[in-house]
Image: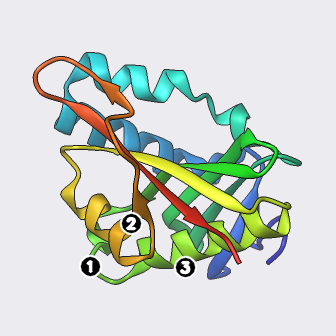
Amino acid sequence: MSAGAAPGRDGFVLVPPEDPRTRPLLEGLHHEYLERYGPRIGAEEMEQHPVDDFAPPTGGLVLLLEGGLTVAGGAFRRHDDATAEFKRIWTAPAHRRRGLSRRVLAELERLAAAAGYRRVRLTTGNRQPEAFALYRSSGYVLLPGRAQVYEDGVYDVGFEKRLR
């Protein structure tokens, strides 16, 4: 993996948070959160974790490019000295059901392990059953309780996985 990719290059690329190729991921996530959770919760999620949280050396933001376009991606940041937190895992709607999120998850795990983390934590909202299924089938263990409770029956569910 390189720190930047030539236009048109396919595959994973680790990018700085301000890279313009992150725009489809960030805008896509924002739209998805608004659609699933409404304007207050959707905006709150994006604001709670600004993209600068994912800067090296304690974090990273990875994009999956096809034909030079961002089709999927995700990020990690420091939770504590041994634990990374994954956020912003997303696949463009036109590219779903192809296993791209699973590939992004595996790449994030590889990068987090290379950064010295031994464990990963992440949360997903209860209105994202496909994310819940992805994490469970990828070896993540459901943490007890709810990570955060919102209004209208919305809550976050936490997961954890030990890295090799």
Query: Which residue sits at x=74%, y=63%?
Result: 118
User: Judging from the image, what secondary structure is the residue with disc 1 in?
Assistant: loop
Q: Residue furthest right?
A: 57
Query: How would you rate the neighbour count of disc 3 (Cα within 10 Å): few for under 14, some for 14-19, many for 20 or more?
Result: few
Tag of residue 135: 2
Marks 2 and 1, the one that precedes in the sequence? 1
**What residue sits right under mark 3 in the picture?**
67
Q: Provide residue 78's location: percent of width, then percent of height.
A: 74, 42
Residue nearer the viewer, 125 or 92: 125
Disc 2 versus disc 3: distance between alpha carbons? 28 Å
Q: Who is closer to the viewer here, 147 or 56? A: 147
x, y percent for residue 129: 20, 57
Q: Earlier in the sequence, mark 2 or mark 3?
A: 3
* Left or right position of 7 against 46: right
Q: Using a 10 Å C-alpha cutoff, classify the residue at mark 2 as few (fewer than 14 neighbours), some (14 to 19) or many (20 or more).
A: many
The image position of residue 76, as x and y in percent, is: 65, 51
State the SS at label 3: loop
Q: Residue at x 57, y 29 (%)?
A: 49
Q: Amino acid at mark 2?
A: Tyr
Residue 103 position, x and y percent, is 51, 79
Marks 2,1: beta carbons within 8 A: no
Rendered position, 67 above or below 109: below
Q: Is residue 43 left or right of residue 18?
A: left
Q: Quadrant of the N terminus?
A: bottom right
Distance of label 1 from label 3 (alpha carbons): 19 Å
- Callout 2 secondary element: helix
